[in-house]
Amino acid sequence: MAREKFSTLTEQMFYILLCLREECCGMDVMARVNELTGGRVAVGPGTLYNLLEQFLAAGYIVETRAEGRRRSYQLTAEGKTLLQNEVERLQAQVRDYEKLFER
């Protein structure tokens, strides 16, 4: 059975949404992800703009400004809920790990 789209997020998805808590453009998102993760997670332009389009279509982000080709985005309430659900899922995984390995 195929999993529902966005039921779990890749690292790139997670960090893009995290960066869009505040309004920013695509180039700023790539720089913030790099800075936030110390370069551990890379988001290239192809991945970024593909995901931005998917997030827009799903209602998780909204375009807030357009200046020429430069577009800015921000999380919607639905996007914040998606991000929070992912945080809770990851925390549950850590708790399961701790139950088994940190006795």
Image (tube, rainbow, N blue to C red):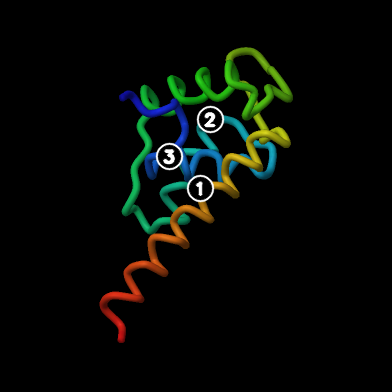
Of tags 3 and 2, which is closer to the observer? 3
**Which mark, by number, is residue 86?**
1
Identified by mark 2, the residue type is Gly
Lower sequence index among marks 2 and 1:
2
Q: Relative to residue 73, is residue 38 depicted above or below?
A: below
Crowding at mark 3 (Cα within 10 Å: few <14, some 14-19, many 20+): some
Crowding at mark 1 (Cα within 10 Å: few <14, some 14-19, many 20+): some
Q: Residue at x 37, y 28 (%)?
A: 3
Of tags 2 and 1, which is closer to the observer? 1
**Looking at the figure, which quarter contains the C terminus?**
bottom left
72 left or right of 97? right
Q: Nearer the viewer, residue 59 or 66?
A: 59
Residue 5, picture quadrant: top left
Q: Nearer the viewer, residue 39 or 98?
A: 98
Give the total of numbered labels: 3
Image location (x, y in percent) of residue 1: 31, 24
Q: Residue at x 47, y 56 (%)?
A: 36
Cα separation between marks 2 and 1: 22 Å
Pointer 3 residue:
9
- Are circles 2 and 1 on residues that touch, CB within 8 Å? no
Identified by mark 1, the residue type is Glu
Pointer 2 residue:
26
